[in-house]
Image (cartoon, rainbow, N blue to C red):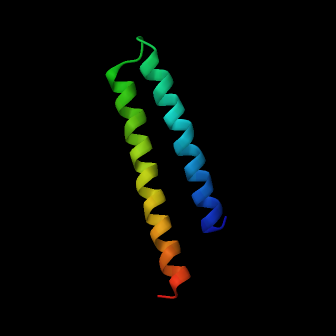
């Protein structure tokens, strides 16, 4: 998988987690633990996206 394809997959997963979080917030039966887990996973993916985007910028600039 190319870096760009991996980045696209991560962005799609982040978007899915965003929807999952919104759905969980809307349902009163969701626990604080469930919300925290979704937020944590979303943050991990966001960090990985930022890392890959940084690597791509460096690679494209020729550094």
Q: Is residue 27 above or below residue 55?
A: above
Q: Residue at x 45, y 58 (%)?
A: 48
Q: Is residue 18 above or below residue 10?
A: above
Total numbered circles: 0
Q: Compare residues 52 and 22 and report the one nearer the observer.
A: 22
Horizontal side of residue 33 vs 7, given as left or right: left
Horizontal side of residue 2 vs 15, given as left or right: right
Pick the quarter of the image with the N terminus. Answer: bottom right
User: Residue 31: where, in percent of width, then height?
Assistant: 36, 18
Horizontal side of residue 55 vs 31, given as left or right: right
Q: Residue at x 62, y 65 (%)?
A: 4
Q: Is residue 3 above or below residue 34?
A: below
User: Residue 44: where, in percent of width, then height?
Assistant: 41, 49
Q: Is residue 58 above or below residue 29?
A: below
Q: Residue at x 61, y 52 (%)?
A: 9
User: Residue 52: where, in percent of width, then height?
Assistant: 49, 65
User: Residue 43: where, in percent of width, then height?
Assistant: 39, 46
Residue most extreme to the bottom: 62
Res. 15 image quadrant: top right
């Amino acid at each position: 998988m190319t870096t760009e394809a991996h980045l696209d997959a991560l962005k799609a997963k982040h978007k899915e987690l965003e929807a999952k979080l919104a759905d969980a917030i809307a349902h009163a039966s969701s626990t604080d633990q469930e919300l925290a887990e979704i937020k944590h996973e979303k943050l991990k993916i966001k960090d990985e996206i930022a890392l890959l985007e940084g690597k791509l910028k460096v690679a494209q600039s020729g550094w």
